Amino acid sequence: MIKIAVLGTSGYGGAELLRILNAHDGVKLNYFGANTQAGQRIDKSFGHFYKHFDSIMDNKELESVCEDNDCILAATPHDFLANILTQNMIEKCVVIDLSADFRLKNPNKYEEYYNFTHPNIPLLKDSVYGLSELYKDEIKQSNLIANPGCYPTCSTLCIAPFIKHGIIDSKSIIIDAKSGVSGAGRSTKLDNLFCEVHENVKAYGLINHRHTAEIEQNLSHIADNEITLSFTPHLIPMNRGILITAYAQLESKYSMITEQEIQRIVEDFYTDCYFIRVLEYGVAPQTRWVKGSNFVDVSVCLDKRNNRVIMMGALDNIVKGAAGQAVQNLNIRFGFAEHKALEQLPLFP
């Protein structure tokens, strides 16, 4: 029985961790951390936990939390763990960080995209990027796992097969992304108020959205070559969901590739990946078919007229884009079945 501490239980990611782990019979939820809501009962903050989670949220020193638990799942803000986590702590306890603090291997990218100087370079170097389908062997051995962002998870999984096999021109990648409002977190922000979001769609983070660096890092690692791309996210008036539509030119030697061949590339790439559902050729993913689940629906379509491939994907930003992938990484790290507590089918309607 693994003792688990969840930090950030008053936010969307933390609450989703509790919902998922409530069905995990291999763990004991041992500590519930919060900042602004410390001292309050969990079910007073989240009514759907009534009669299930009535513990008081606490705000202990991280050193103490590490000593009392086998694993910390930290759904905390960016620039939090980076300032207080130490090598001594991760030797006592596995840390799975849902923030961006240990995702980017180039510390200069934090100054460029997150506006802070990374204070913990040694741990940044030692961290493992927790994209479960691509780095499973590394995750099994690591005590510091950087859980990926929601946009980078979906974008990388859509494009990875074609980068790996050199099918597309890596200089031509354009990603059009859509997200539900929960991706911005639970704190009060003017742009996320109902009247600001309802019946409206808008692009944001043009040119320099912080997830651009993470996506480029992922694809560059797969390609073994530096990749830059265009990434434009949009805010959609729905609670949950990420939808990715990515475009790239075919490399000239693949200009005659067939629909059957390009479909087979995706299917073969994800043969052993439980949570990746490769749709039939040309079927466009929809956020409603992955809502509430840890599944990622991916598909591909050839635009022969323009010699272009269209790569598509959908996931739930709070589950596979955050808490679900964190639990998937926990399962991999501690030797549980990878899908343990994550078998639930999507919710509909």
Image (cartoon, rainbow, N blue to C red):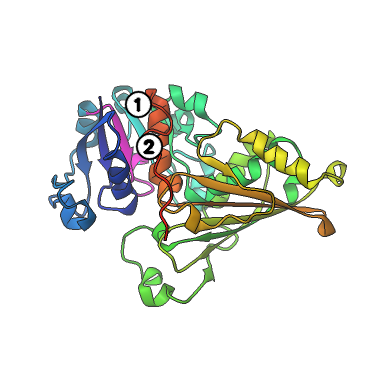
Judged left or right of residue 138, residue 88 is left
| Type of amino acid under label 1 | Gln
Mark 1 sits on what residue?
87
Q: Which element type, helix, strand or loop, lies under badge 1? A: helix
Check if mark 2's residue and mark 1's residue have beta carbons within 8 Å. no
Label 2, on which residue?
327
The residues colored magenta run: 69-82
Q: Is residue 119 visible?
A: no
Mark 2, secondary structure of its residue: helix
Can you give x and y, in whole percent of width and height, for residue 37 in the image? 19, 54
Work out whether residue 179 can be spotted.
Answer: yes
Q: Residue at x 28, y 23 (%)?
A: 92
**Where 244 falls versus 87 (above or below)?**
below
Quarter of the image that includes the C terminus: bottom left
Indicate yes or no whether the magenta region holds residue 337: no
**Residue at x 38% of width, y 44% of height:** 323
Where residue 6 sits in the image (x, y, percent)?
27, 40
| Total numbered labels | 2
Q: Position of residue 179 (x, y in %)?
A: 49, 60
Query: Callout 2, which amino acid?
Result: Val
User: Looking at this view, is 250 or 33 the one in front?
Assistant: 250
